[in-house]
Image: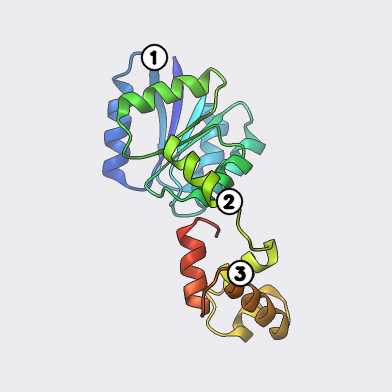
Amino acid sequence: MITLLLAEDQTMFRGAMATLLSLEPDLSVVVQLSRGDEVVNAATAFRPDIALLDIEMPGIDGLEAARRLRAAVPTTRVMILTTFGRPGYLRSAVDAGVAGFLLKDAPVTELAVAIRKVFAGEQVVDPSLALAALSEGASPLTPRETEVLAASRSHGTIADIARGLHLSPGTVRNHLSAAIQKLGTRTRTEALSVAESKGWL
């Protein structure tokens, strides 16, 4: 029996998926969660074979939960299920040690096959996402430019961002300017939109 942890913040979707997966004779959902920051504790307690994680969750997102889970319970393999087919997310997932990356609209029978493959030690990636990630390439932003651009989502002014990141306003301005230029946009808001759409933030 392959034991599964299912972390998904949409209650109805999580319940339906758990029910459908449990109809498979060799699959058992042993724990269901709605928050990313509950994943490690639950996996430590239940030791599931595979954790199925959504990306967008309260607490921490699925990619960060995957990174923490790989460190805390390395015997649990991680699969990401998402509605967001962004190439940058796939790259981040691979960097986090994720063994599977599928879109939520895949049929449950296809998901069950993917779970069995991951359990057997294989990596499974949605083919269309893999192709998009290869054609898209890596983010052109440096880690610091990414950090500053991401911080600009929740901080209003240059001074606010600088305070939040413990940088000088001039340094923040330079990083934002570089990010805007590299992404071929005119404003910070446009740069944010492009970086988010590609899954680079």
Helix, strand or loop status at disc 3: helix
Number of the label disc, if any, that sits on residue 174: none
Is residue 73 or residue 87 the one in the foreground? 87
Q: Residue at x 52, y 53 (%)?
A: 60
Earlier in the chain: of badge 3 and badge 1, it is 1
Q: Which residue is mark 1?
A: 26
The residue beneath circle 3 is 182
Q: The residue under label 2 is which amino acid type?
A: Gly
First in sequence: mark 1 vs mark 2: 1
Name the amino acid type tagged 3.
Answer: Lys
What residue is rendered at 54% in x and 78% in y?
Answer: 155
Q: Are marks 3 and 1 in contact (CB under 8 Å)?
A: no
Q: Point out residue 82 in the picture as x, y percentages from the top left corner.
A: 40, 44
Q: Residue 158 occupies which quadrant of the picture?
A: bottom right
Mark 3–mark 1 distance (CA, rounded to whole Å) = 49 Å
Q: At x 72% / y 80%, what residue is drawn?
A: 171
